[in-house]
Amino acid sequence: MDSKIVSLRSKLEIYKAGSGGGNIADCPVRDVIQGISNKWSSLLIMALAEKPYRFGELRRLVPDISQRMLTQTLHDLQRDGYVHREVFPTKPPSVEYSLTDLGRSMFGPLYQLLQWAELNHDAVRAARAAFDATET
Amino acid sequence: MDSKIVSLRSKLEIYKAGSGGGNIADCPVRDVIQGISNKWSSLLIMALAEKPYRFGELRRLVPDISQRMLTQTLHDLQRDGYVHREVFPTKPPSVEYSLTDLGRSMFGPLYQLLQWAELNHDAVRAARAAFDATET
DNA sequence: TAGTGCTGGTCTCTTTTTGAGACTGATATA
DNA sequence: TATATCAGTCTCAAAAAGAGACCAGCACTA
């Protein structure tokens, strides 16, 4: 446990040293992380990790996403190289979205986080309840 | 690699089965993930993983966060149990923010993702460049 | 033949979230 | 007396997200 903290500490020193002024505003990690830490990005990656889906299927799978945000998020994920978009010349035309190799590679670490979330859901909910109780 | 995909697949089946209707809208993982996948949350967790910081220090460390969002994000992280807030009765009063045990526990997997981001920053930038080139 | 539904989106309008920046008030410093 | 620091809050403008109508092309049905 200590070794983990030590290693991250040296990492973060590198980020800060790299940006020159002791801040992490233009750290390269931010550039990548902000692309996948949106409300919908990680969710869609998670869905597509299971298997390729078509636009309408994703829409039904994630009912509370608007069509507008689904289009836009998939577009952004495609731009960053995580998602492949393929149009099939059926009538009406169908579009399939799937993870690229880069996307699957990223899903490895992301999945660790998802597992943590599942394991610690109760702890987080308890913390919220305790916090709200003292605040009232 | 294959074993990883198989295991995630079974996991996702559980999420979908749990929600009953084949969607992941009310999956418990979302509840946790959305709290840490904001523009600023992961960044502040990352900073606090190094060492505790005071409000003004965080503000200088992340120069492009507004004071308003710093207050709000720290508040949310505290509510979810990741961050501890301690007020010292100095004059003027100082406030120190640090990770809780839960926060440090969550930073483990998050750090894996940060490492991936650092390693694959170039690949993502290349994907963006390629995408933008074909789009023009 | 007119009506309906499906496909994957776009367009517009409204609501929510975020950002920019002035302001607080007690205290130390010049 | 003037100025700066602390950790915020408040207000207003700008940006982002959500809701829902609308699109073209084709298949199926009445």
Image (cartoon, coloured by chain):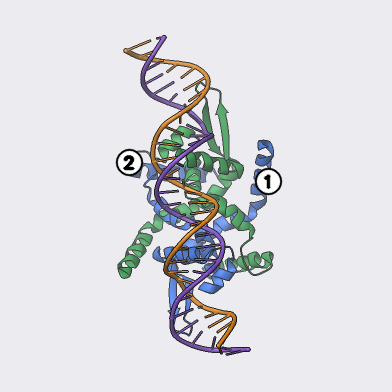
Chain colours: A green, B blue, C purple, D orange
Local packing at callout 1 (Cα closer than 10 Å; few below 14, some 14-19, many 20+) is some
Q: Amino acid at mark 1?
A: Ala
Which residue: 51% across, 64% down? B45
> In the figure, residue B23 lies in which quadrant?
top left
Foreground: A23 or B70?
B70
Residue B51 in view of the camera: no
Q: Chain of mark 1?
A: B
Q: Which residue is mark 1?
A: B126
> In the figure, residue A102 lies in which quadrant?
top right
Identify the element where label 2 is drawn: loop
Foreground: D23 or B49?
D23
| Distance between mark 1 and mark 2 Cα atoms | 40 Å
Which numbered mark, 1 or 2, is in the foreground of this view?
A: 1
For the C terminus of chain A, the quadrant is: bottom left
Q: Which residue is mark 2?
A: B20
Q: Amino acid at mark 2?
A: Gly
Foreground: B60 or B78?
B60
Mark nearer the N terminus (1 vs 2): 2
Picture coordinates of residue B21, whole percent (x, y): 34, 39
